[in-house]
Amino acid sequence: MDVQQLIKEQVTGNPVALYMKGTPKAPMCGFSAMAVQILQACNLPLFFSVNVLEDQVVREGVKEYSNWPTIPQLYVRGEFVGGCDIMREMYESGELKSLLEGIAVPD
């Protein structure tokens, strides 16, 4: 499968997708750790995540997919939201919590 098709399926097949360095339980950079903390603070303890350190093709492919040069990258309901700084700004304004309202947490 083409990496762009894979990424499209991941972001559209999951209500929330976070492309990050490491995993939510073991982030491998401060920005990824902050992104996880922000989602958890929005009462979203579980979400789909992709560790870009495990696959260089996905790591570069997601940057191309979003036309955004950095990781982490957050997608909500198939739409690119932004990276850590944008997530922080949206969290502080309350916009991110509103965006995430109604998303069911998987069992």
Image (spheres, rainbow, N blue to C red):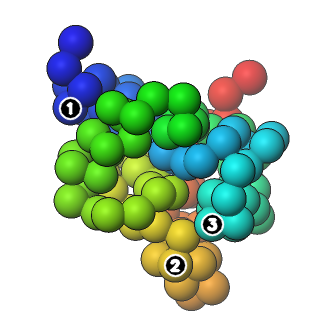
Residue placed most toward the observer, 70 or 17 = 70
Query: Residue type at mark 2?
Result: Asp
Compare marks 1 and 3 and give the one earlier in the sequence: 1
Q: Is residue 93 left or right of residue 8?
A: right
Mark yes or no: residue 95 visible: no
Query: Could you say whether the residue bearing mark 1 is in a helix, strand or loop?
Result: helix
Question: Which residue is drawn at the image coordinates 39% and 41% (left, top)?
Answer: 59
Q: Which mark is residue 85?
A: 2
Determine the CA span between mark 2 and mark 3. 9 Å
Query: Residue type at mark 3?
Result: Phe
Whether label 2 touches label 3, CB < 8 Å:
no
- According to the picture, the residue beneath numbered tag 1 turns out to be 4
Query: Residue type at mark 1?
Result: Gln
Q: Which mark is residue 31?
A: 3
> Which quadrant of the view contains residue 47?
top right
Residue 100 appears at what percent x and percent y?
54, 57
Rendered view: 102 above or below 37: above
Give the mark count.
3
Furthest residue toward right? 25
Determine the CA span between mark 2 and mark 1. 25 Å
Of badges 2 and 3, nearer the viewer stands: 3
Residue placed most toward the observer, 58 or 91 = 58
Rendered view: 44 above or below 58: below
